[in-house]
Image (tube, rainbow, N blue to C red):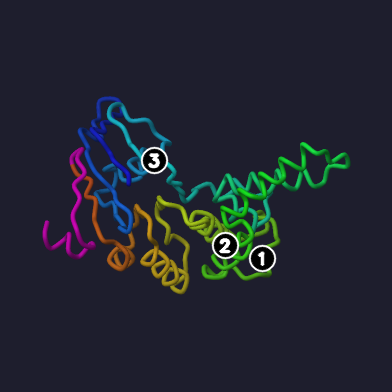
């Protein structure tokens, strides 16, 4: 669960949010809507911890991993595509790298052996043995064929990079998904695959998008940003439109 309590934010003299109180619960998908400039993307950044509000707080249940769709398409240019997806679970990726470094040591010690045993245990608990398979499945679902999985991100086209970053966000069964315009640069087949993925997703999804069909298909709730307040409605975009 995510609890938003008394959030307030100003940019200079402009009041963007005031006394925002919300709860987001697992199994639901929330579409954040509002006029351009109302603060939709800013609100996502507050939830993600990228922007500190002037007042109030965001509380996330302990042990819940949040995953965010990255917007910098050049951030991972020197990384292999498959590795970039696995980086979606930062701790798992750290374990993989630590293991590789320890196993490659020419003077592997007893202490190293004990450390590796600990890492292997954590790796197994995080379903690490399936990581590459899961990453590959996500990439293929979004239309990134296996011939691209071992290439550097810098070798991909812009639309392909977007799909890889989306696969990164979806990787590793996060408890919370924060998605800002996830359908940008996606073809119809990829959008359909993403819709099915999110409908089946058991965690919390919070999404900003201008794609009304996509919102209608996946969202169980709408979060309407208007005049510094955010109000939750049950139902998809069409239901919100009729009721408001």
Which residue: 53% across, 46% down? 72
Which residue: 41% across, 36% down? 49
Q: Do residues under tags 2 and 1 come within 8 Å of each other at their CB atoms?
A: yes
What is the CA distance from the residue labelled 2 to the residue labelled 3? 24 Å
Q: What x and y, as percent, mark residue 136?
A: 60, 66
Q: Residues within 10 Å of mark 2 (few under 14, many from 20)?
A: many
Which residue: 12% across, 63% down? 242
Badge number at residue 148 = 1
Q: Which residues are magenta?
A: 227-244
Nearest to N terminus: mark 1 or mark 3: 3
What is the CA distance from the residue labelled 1 to the residue labelled 3? 31 Å
Nearest to N terminus: mark 2 or mark 1: 1
Give the side of residue 111 with respect to residue 4, left or right: right
Badge number at residue 160 = 2
Q: Which residue is mark 3?
A: 45
Give the side of residue 40 with respect to residue 92, left or right: left
As displayed, is residue 25 above or below residue 167? above
Residue 67 on the magenta span: no
As displayed, is residue 121 above or below residue 242? above
Q: Secondary structure at mark 2?
A: helix
The C terminus lies in quadrant? bottom left
């Amino acid at each position: 669960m995510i609890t938003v309590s008394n959030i307030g934010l100003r940019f200079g003299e402009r009041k963007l949010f005031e006394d925002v109180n919300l709860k987001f619960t697992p199994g639901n998908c929330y579409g954040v809507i509002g006029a351009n400039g109302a603060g939709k993307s800013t609100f996502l950044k507050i939830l993600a911890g990228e922007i500190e509000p002037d007042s109030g707080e965001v509380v996330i249940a302990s042990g819940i991993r949040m995953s965010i769709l990255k917007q910098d398409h050049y951030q991972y240019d020197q990384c292999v595509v498959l590795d970039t997806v696995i980086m979606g679970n930062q701790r798992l990726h750290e374990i993989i790298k630590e293991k590789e470094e320890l196993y490659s040591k020419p003077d592997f010690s007893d202490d190293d052996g004990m450390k590796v045993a600990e890492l292997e245990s954590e790796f197994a608990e995080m379903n690490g043995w399936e990581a590459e398979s899961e990453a590959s499945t996500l990439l293929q679902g979004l239309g990134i064929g296996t011939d691209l999985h071992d290439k550097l991100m810098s070798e991909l086209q812009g639309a392909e990079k977007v799909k890889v970053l989306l696969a990164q966000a979806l990787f590793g069964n996060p408890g919370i998904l924060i998605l800002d315009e996830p359908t940008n640069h996606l073809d119809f087949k990829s959008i359909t695959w993403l819709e099915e993925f999110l409908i089946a997703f058991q965690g919390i999804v919070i999404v900003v998008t201008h794609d009304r069909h996509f919102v209608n298909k996946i969202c169980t709730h709408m979060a309407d940003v208007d005049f510094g307040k955010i109000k939750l409605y049950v139902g998809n975009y069409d239901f919100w439109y009729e009721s408001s």
